[in-house]
Image (cartoon, rainbow, N blue to C red):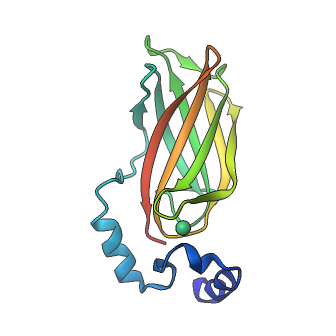
Amino acid sequence: MRRAVLPILLGLGLAACGSEGTAPTDQRARQCAAETRAATYAPGMSELSSGGLEVRLVENLVGDQPGAPDRGMNTLRLEVLDEAGVVHTDLPLRMKAWMPDHGHGTTPLFHDGEVDGEVIEVGPFDLHMAGFWELTVLVERAGAEDPVVFAFCVEG
Ligand SMILES: [Cu+2]
């Protein structure tokens, strides 16, 4: 499948934002092994915002299957907890998916959260390239956006 898709992507001019798109799979895997900025995905992992909120990544879906963020369509299932540990579904949030090394993100760049029970779902969004991605969750509280960053290396 990927062999068939790559020439199409290259034809769209995406080759300009990195050479790893054409690198052999083992070379990309080594890039991720050496990527010190990236977290290792685990369901339930969480990050604290400077404003005191906890954003928990309940799970990521690749397509409709649980798994580590990967190339293609991903969906984050999040919980937002306040300082008292209370789960909030009343705080609007959006997520920005960005490749800082390449200076581009997904199209569209921002993805709004939608409440699904006690979980807030973001996506599906397309991680269209292998490499280092920052998924910045911006939770709106008291008129300001409080960011939390989940950083992953996508081996593709
Ligand atoms: Cu890129």
93 vs 66, left or right, is right
Q: Position of residue 43 (x, y in %)?
A: 43, 44
The quarter of the displayed image where residue 50 is located = top left
The residue depicted at 46 percent of the width and 78 percent of the height is 20
Residue 23 drawn above or below residue 38: below
The quarter of the displayed image where residue 34 is located = bottom left
122 vs 50, left or right, is right
Count of picture labels: 0
Q: Position of residue 66 (x, y in %)?
A: 53, 54
The residue depicted at 59 percent of the width and 89 percent of the height is 3
The residue depicted at 47 percent of the width and 22 percent of the height is 53
The quarter of the displayed image where residue 113 is located = top right
Residue 34 drawn above or below residue 118: below
Q: Position of residue 115 (x, y in %)?
A: 69, 31
Dividing the image into 4 quarters, which one contains the N terminus? bottom right
Q: Residue furthest top?
A: 84
Quadrant assignment for ligand 1 = bottom right
Q: Nearer the viewer, residue 42 or 38?
A: 38
Q: Nearer the viewer, residue 16 or 90?
A: 16
152 vs 135, left or right, is left
Q: Position of residue 137 (x, y in %)?
A: 55, 37
The residue depicted at 51 percent of the width and 32 percent of the height is 147
Residue 89 drawn above or below residue 121: above
